[in-house]
Amino acid sequence: MGTFSWTHLLIIALLFVLLFGAKRLPDAARGLGRSLRIFKSEVGQMQSESQAPAAQAPAPAPAAPQQLPAAQPQAAPVADPQPGQKSV
């Protein structure tokens, strides 16, 4: 009761042909194959990176904190003239 018989698989195949059409099925299968290939290569790349962390270049040392110059007296800010006032 838990497995599909050949008649079930035949019905499923016919439904796919009816839903997608005979012209679109090869394109869909080709796209699925490309996606699986890309997925497998990415997973393999991630596994190779996680297995060889010592082979990677060491991270650069953080930069030394910059010292701010000593506080200098600042001039008072110049206010913009109000409308109707003359500027000097």
Image (cartoon, rainbow, N blue to C red):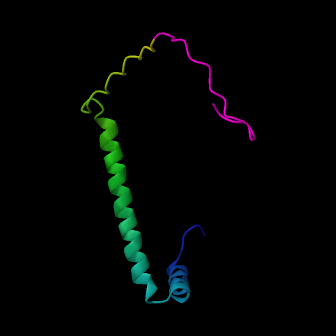
Magenta: main secondary structure: loop
- Residue lying at 41% horizontally and 17% vertically, measured from the top left: 66
- Residue lying at 66% horizontally and 34% vertically, measured from the top left: 80
- Residue lying at 51% horizontally and 12% vertically, measured from the top left: 72
Q: Say which of 72 and 21 sits in front.
A: 72
Question: Where 32 falls versus 64 (above or below)?
Answer: below
Of all residues, the one furthest to the right in this rendering is 84
Q: Say which of 75 and 70 sits in front.
A: 75
Across and down, in percent, residue 67 comes to 43, 14
Across and down, in percent, residue 8 comes to 55, 80
Q: Which residues are magenta?
A: 70-88
Q: Quadrant of residue 81?
A: top right
Quadrant (top left/top right/bottom left/bottom right) for the C terminus: top right
Q: Say which of 7 and 72 sits in front.
A: 72
Across and down, in percent, residue 14 comes to 52, 87
Q: Is residue 56 left or right of residue 31?
A: left
- Residue lying at 38% horizontally and 63% vertically, measured from the top left: 36
Question: Where 37 falls versus 78 (above or below)?
Answer: below
Q: Is residue 14 left or right of residue 53?
A: right
Across and down, in percent, residue 76 comes to 62, 19
Quadrant (top left/top right/bottom left/bottom right) for the N terminus: bottom right
